[in-house]
Each structure stands twice: as structure tokens, then as C-alpha cells.
Image: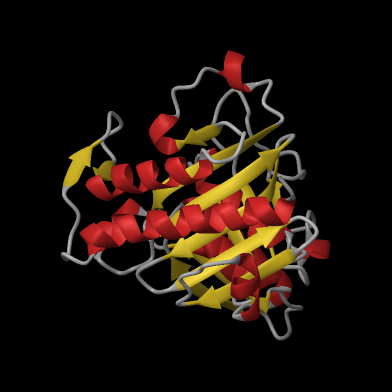
Amino acid sequence: MEIKELLEVALKAALKGGEAVLKFYSKGKGEVFLKEDKSPLTKADLLSHREITETLSSTSYPILSEEGKGIPYSKRKNWKRFWLVDPLDGTKEFIKGNGEFTVNVALIEEGRPIIGVVYAPAIGELYFAALGLGSFKTLNFKGPSLDAVLKESFRLKGRVPKGGVTIVKSRSHPSKETEEFIKKLKERFGEVREVSRGSSLKLCLVAEGKADVYPRFGPTMEWDTAAGQAVVEMSEGVVVNVETEMRLTYNKESLKNPFFIALTSGLKSFYPPL
């Protein structure tokens, strides 16, 4: 399948996942269970996972999901392409009822996300990107085809910061390292405006140019970031490993991400001096 065909499949999968999530969210709250690590899991997670995997199974690529993370590295290390999925990113935001949760679908090739779809069904925001096509956003769109989506979308190109910078922070996961990073930004750029968002929407704000930088000095998993990273990178921004200063990569033996920083296209030349 060509990349545009694969993007269309990813869009359909994300939309179906979002519809599944809203079946529970519209009731005002999810029915909450606990995972082994004590973080919240909802029935919405499970139904979204099923809808997404059923849709993606029409392709020939394997699927790695938060709800199917037990696939051993010995098996997946030889995958050249695979789908990486988070059926409900931002379960805390889902439970709080603020709408800032997403469905994330990404296609990984040789460790890099080449397709990404981030769908926030409660607020009607859909971000998507593909290598060679670009990065886009649309509002309140339900399908059915990629050409139809593109007609209703606008291209994301980030921005060049003027008169200070805007940083987007996690709404539910603050850290001391983030506050120290903000101090460094103030020393260099003067004014620093702060906004908070939940889930992978933070990455999308960087791609959209509504934020210039998103530092994450806290735990995340590969499925949390892959789709959003594609949206950032196809908007000419970057998502870099803090330690190596290289692109964040995927399908590692450990599925945990290192600390990272996402920068809009107009700010990426200022890293790593920050």
C-alpha cells in the first residue's frame, strides 16, 4: 500500500477509536479499572483498542499497542514497519472530563514515525501527518476519504518566535526539571508564556505554532509520543532525546522514552544551546 492509502487507514482507525471512547465519555465518566501499575484504565481504552486494531488489520503490518505491549523484543526487533497505537492517551484528562485526551495511531518505519494521527474526539480536533505529504489539522471531521479530509484541513508549519517564547507543559505531570528549563528559557528569551495541555495535544500545539517548545522530563512510553512526533516533524519541527540530541526513536528493547524536547520549526536551530 502507498503511504497515502496507509494514512487513510490510520485516519479511519483513529476516528473509530474516538467514536468508541465517546460512547463512555458522553456518560460523564468512564468506568475505571486499575492496571498493574495502578494507573487508570477504562472500558473506553479496551473498546477503542479493539476498533483500531480491527481497522489496521486490513494492512500487512503488525500492531504494537499499549493494550498489547507484551510482544517480546525478540519478535518485534525485526519489524521494518509496524503500527504503534495508544487507544486512549490522557486517561486522567478523560476521567476529569476536560476533553484533553486523544487517540493516537502511528506507522513506524526503521525506528521513525512516518505517519501519525492524533484525534481528540471530545473537542473535535484531528491532527495528521505523513512523510512526503506534510502535517495538517482539521476540526469536527468524520471522514470518509483522505482527499475529503485534506480539503477541510490546513497545513501546519510551526512558527518563528517573536518577543519571547511559549512553552506547553503537562497538565497532570509537573516536574522540577521543567521549572528549571523554564528558567533557562527566561534567561535566553526574556518573556516565557506558559500553557498547559493533556495527552499528545502538547506535541500538536508545537506543530501548530501555538507553542514553541514542549520539554518532557518525566516518564512516557513510545505509544504516547509516536503519532505526535510525526505531526511535529512533518511540520518541520523536531523531537529530540535530551541526552543524545538526536531524534526520538522507536521499537527499542525498552518501550520507555528518554526525556525529550519538542521544538517548533522556528526554534529548532536554538537547540542544543538551551
Seen from the viewer's position, the closer of residues 184 and 128 is 128
* Residue 50: percent from left, percent from top: 36, 41
Asked if residue 124 is positioned above or below residue 58 in the image, the reply reads: below
Asked if residue 135 is positioned above or below residue 63 in the image, the reply reads: below
Seen from the viewer's position, the closer of residues 248 and 150 is 150
Q: Quadrant of the C terminus?
A: bottom right
Q: Residue at x 59, y 72 (%)?
A: 149
Seen from the viewer's position, the closer of residues 115 and 34 is 115
Q: Residue at x 60, y 13 (%)?
A: 74
Report the number of discs.
0
* Residue 10: percent from left, percent from top: 56, 53
* Residue 254: percent from left, percent from top: 56, 26
Residue furthest right as drawn: 269
Residue furthest bottom as drawn: 163
Q: Residue at x 32, y 52 (%)?
A: 91
Q: How was this image coloured?
A: secondary structure
Q: Residue at x 57, y 52 (%)?
A: 9
Seen from the viewer's position, the closer of residues 153 and 187 is 153
* Residue 60: percent from left, percent from top: 62, 34
Residue 217 visible: no
Residue 159 visible: yes
Asked if residue 259 is positioned above or below residue 268 in the image, the reply reads: above
Q: Quadrant of the N terminus?
A: top right
